Image: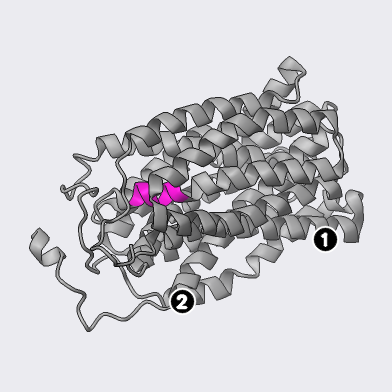
Amino acid sequence: MTDAVLDQPMALAEEPIGRRHVAAAVVGNALEFYDFVTYTFFAVQIGAAFFPSHDPFVQQMSSLITFGVGFITRPIGALVIGRYGDRAGRKPAMMLSFGLMGVAILGLALTPSFAQIGIAAPVLVVIWRLVQGFALGGEVGPTTAYLIEAAPPGQRGLYGSLQYASQGFSSLVGGLVGVGLSATVGDAALGAWGWRLAFLIGALVLPWGLWLRRSLPETRHRTEVRTAAQPAAATLRGHGRIIALGLMITANGTIATYIFNNMTSYAQTTLKMAPGAALAASIVVGLTLIVFGLLGGALSDRIGRKPMMLWPRLLLMAAVVPGFTLLAAHPDHTTLLVVTGVLSTIAVLAGSTGITAVVESMHRDVRSLAFAGVYSTAVAVFGGTTQPIITWMVKATGNPVAPAWYLVGACAVGVVAILLLPESRPATAPGQPR
């Protein structure tokens, strides 16, 4: 098919994409991330259930390494399901990933503890984590492509940021569930069975999410105007520079995300705070992802992608070390929430725009696969290792500020990539909304 045909106006026969369709994509994505991030919130309790040890550090590291196992299959899921989304359509790919995640979330919640079935328990947990990783690796590419392709003119940044906001919703709900369970059943019951209830609550959304996604109109074959920032080739050849820069930007965002998602475990193990107080940090992270993720996306539609990616990152580089230093000196509930909220807000303003910038820089015929590959590879390498690395850094150096320096280095890499990435916001006629 020629570019001239691709750039023709949308056929009248195509079903319009309404808010409920966008909601279906976002809700499904939120559930998948809920399952994934809830593991991090309950890493301490999961470690006690499946990796018992007399050394709490060994127990926590075993749990976090198992969490990292889920990242191994994310690039595989990106390759298989992402390519499927480019060939068969966004809708069937999203149905497949959602169904697989449903199986994994139920499996993890219902697996007996080490005390009940011995070594089979951690083996099963690893299997469920591998399935989760495969499903989530295949979810991000088709869903993000769907949101970008469904966006009205001049609102790609806002719609693309829904990917980020849905992750924030997952963090928020997961934190609220954790705090609610901790307050209701107590810390002992939370470790014994309460964490399982958190996963089962997420599983309640499965039937509704599948029903919503069945109603989605397909966006894969819808037309769009090609911009100068988009690669002209319809294959992955010619995307090498965008892929490399996208990996650098996504790696930076991933490290920031998992450092702040780890604040709950960090507060319990390093700052010695109670689980209920520590889980409140995840609520703050979730709120900032939703509110400032959407704000960052909307602002990028007005002032461009690069400014919204660059300036918040520079600010984060300057603020993160003083923030962690303050928290280490005053490890109380209020300081935890304030520091987490401020630093997470800055990181989110930068990160939500990066998703849109990378996706819209790719040709639609390969963007599901290409972005899924970029995102999943960066997350597999850095998301799966960030929490074990910063936990080890604190242990090895005895310095609770060590995670901040890791984030400073990641931001420096991200800044270089942003400076080299072309502006991808589509140009418009004077006086017209972008």
Using the rendered view, name the quadrant where residue 270 is placed: top right
Q: As shown in the figure, which amino acid type bears the numbered disc 1?
A: Gly
- Measured as percent of width and height from the top left, residue 53 is found at 81, 30
User: Which residue appears at 26% of the width and 35% of the height?
Assistant: 240
Q: Which residue is mark 1?
A: 180
Q: Are marks 1 and 2 in contact (CB under 8 Å)?
A: no
Say how the picture is coloured: one colour
Range drawn in magenta: 353-359
Q: Which circle's residue, 1 or 2, is located before the other in the chain?
A: 2
- How much space separates mark 1 and mark 2, taking CA atoms? 31 Å
Front-lying residue, 417 or 243? 417
Q: Is residue 165 visible?
A: yes
- Measured as percent of width and height from the top left, residue 295 is found at 53, 58
Q: Which residue is mark 2?
A: 19
- Measured as percent of width and height from the top left, residue 61 is found at 70, 30
Left-right relation of 33 to 179: left
User: Which residue appears at 46% of the width and 56% of the height?
Assistant: 299
Is residue 357 a member of the stretch shown in magenta?
yes
Of the 4 image quadrants, the one containing the N terminus is: bottom left
Q: As shown in the figure, which amino acid type bears the numbered disc 2?
A: Arg
